[in-house]
Image: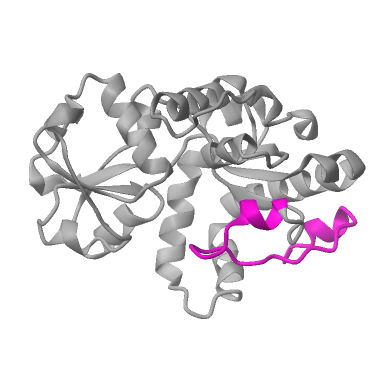
Amino acid sequence: MDKGYFKEEGLNVEIRPGGIDKNSITLVAAGEDTFGLHDTGSLLLARAQGMPLITIATFFQKHPGGVFGLKDSGIQTLKDFEGKLIGFQEGGPWMLTKAMMKANGVDINSVKTVTVQYDITPLLEGKIDLMTCYATNEPLVARRMGKEPIVFLPADYGVPTASEALFTTEAYLKDNPKVARGMVRAIQRGWEYAMANKEEAVDIVMKYGTELDKAAEMDQLVAEEAHLMTPEVKESGVIGLMTPEKWETIYKVLREQGALETEVDYMKAFTTEYLK
């Protein structure tokens, strides 16, 4: 918005902040918002519930959801999870973590669990051994507090999925293909510029958030680069790339864990037409 990319596509855009109490899926499905950003797994679950939502780009090729601990805990491999206590919140990172453990021969029955909030204090105080996280968030908080994190991402252990999915309704997409194409193109340009001009990008973000910490925002932007600019993106030259394989992976994870009780045609949940 600040660089005028939306305007150059002929789009008049209002950016609404997200949050735990603001579900972009229900807002877009209800027509209150036109486009939204969410997780691919949640979008498949929404389609199973009859919401005709369709994804037109996934900006994080490498899902940042997983689990982390502290290096001084002695946990170095996935097998070290056995007998440990994991603090988790229900959602994508926990489902993917369970899939990662299963795929790598971890005895899940030996792993103890407890529900926690998003505060990392229980981990820092040694009350839990591991905690579900987004690699672009909680581990960075731990590092700023003087603790060195060790992060285990399912994407690195045989469970590759994407996230930061840009979606709208099938009806809106059908009636407004030019808007959708412009939206994708503007956000692609925004990401590309932000990666090449991180200092300026953070300064722009700071204008929109009165309680943001500049150093924390820079840490997050730097961390996001590994999830956005993956080798496949660099090779293809397409930010927002989507592959059937990653959609199939998250579909199988949801089915195997009982989160998705009915079959869904995941191939109809997305289209690559607007990336061309």
Q: Position of residue 103 (x, y in %)?
A: 31, 20
The residue lying furthest to the bottom in this view is 210
User: Which of 3/25 is in front?
Assistant: 25
Which stretch did the figure color magenta? Answer: 1-29
Numbered disc total: 0
Is residue 149 on the magenta stretch? no
Horizontal and vertical percent position of residue 31: 77, 57
Residue in the picture at 48% in, 35% down: 62
Q: Quadrant of the N terminus?
A: bottom right
* Image quarter (top left, top right, bottom left or bottom right) of the C terminus: top right
Residue 122 drawn above or below residue 172: below
Q: In the rendering, at what x and y percent does residue 196 appear?
A: 59, 50
Residue sitting at 46 percent across and 64 percent down? 217
Vertical order, 77 against 34 (above or below) = above
Where is 46 relative to 35, above or below? above
On the question of residue 261 being in view, the answer is: yes
Rendering coords of residue 136 (x, y %): 41, 51
